[in-house]
Amino acid sequence: MKKYKNIIIICVLAALAIWYYFYLSNRTAMDSANKNVTTTEIEDTLAKNIDNVTNTPRAAIKFYSIILQCLYNEDPTEEEITALGEKAREIMDEELINNNPEETYFDALSTEVKEYLQDNRKMIGYVVESSDKVEYYTENGKEYAIVNASYTLRKTNDFTKTNEAYILRKDEEGYWKILGWRIAADEVTDDQNNDE
C-alpha cells in the first residue's frame, strides 16, 4: 500500500510540474501578444473605416483633424505620411480630389510635414464645433454643410491658433466629404470631445 501511495504522490507532483510549465509558457506568450497589441495613434487612425467617420459633417471633420494631428504632432515615416494622405483623400469630395492630382498632393504633403518637423512646429490640439452649430444648405439639389474647426499650433514656446471653415458635400451614398476649406474669422470654442 505504501508503494502505491508513493507512486500516486510522484504522479501528482509530475502532473503539477507539467501544468506549471505549460502555465508559464502560455503566460509568456500571452504577455508578448499583449505587448504587440499596443498601437500608435497613427496605426489606430489608419485602421478606421471611413464609412464610420463620414456619416455626419462633424464626424468627418473630427476624423480629418485626427489625421492632421498624426501628421503634424507625431513623427511619421514617409510611408505613414503617404498612408495618412491616402486616408485624408478618402474623406475628400471627388471635385477636390480632381483638383489636387495624387502626385502633386503627396509631394506637397510630404514637404509640408518635413518643414513642420524642421521648424520644430507641431499641431498640439484641435476643436471642432458642436453638431448644433453646423450650417446646412442645399444648392442645385445637393446637400452641403459648413463645419468650423480651430487648430492650436506650437513652434518652440510660441502658440498660435488657426480657424478653418470646412465645406462638405453629401455624396450619392450619403457620406459627407470635404469639398474645400477657408480661413474662418471666428474661433471655435466647443469641446473637441463632445459626442455627436
Image (cartoon, rainbow, N blue to C red):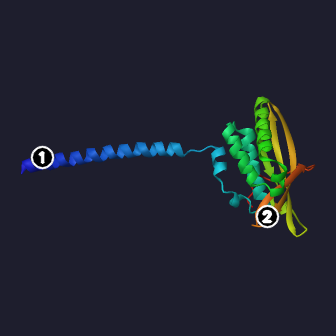
**Residue 55 in the image: x percent, y percent?**
74, 63
Identify residue for label 2.
171
The answer to which of 2 and 100 lies nearer the viewer is: 100
Three-letter residue code for mark 2: Asp
Q: Which amino acid type corresponds to the residue marked 1 in the rendered image?
A: Asn
Q: Are marks 1 and 2 in contact (CB under 8 Å)?
A: no
Q: What element carries label 2?
A: loop
Depth check, mark 1 against mark 2: the one in front is 2
Examine the rendering and report whether any part of residue 121 can be seen.
no
Sequence-wise, which precedes: disc 1 or disc 2?
A: 1
Task: Identify the residue shown where x is 63% and y is 51%.
Answer: 47
Percent x, y of residue 9: 17, 47
| Residue 90 left/right relative to 133 | left
Left or right: where does residue 115 sit relative to residue 80?
Answer: right
Q: Which residue is drawn at 6% across and 51% down?
A: 1
Q: Mark 1 points at which residue?
A: 6
Pointer 2 local density, CA inside 10 Å: few below 14, some 14–19, many at least 20: some
- Report whether 48 appears left or right of 194: left
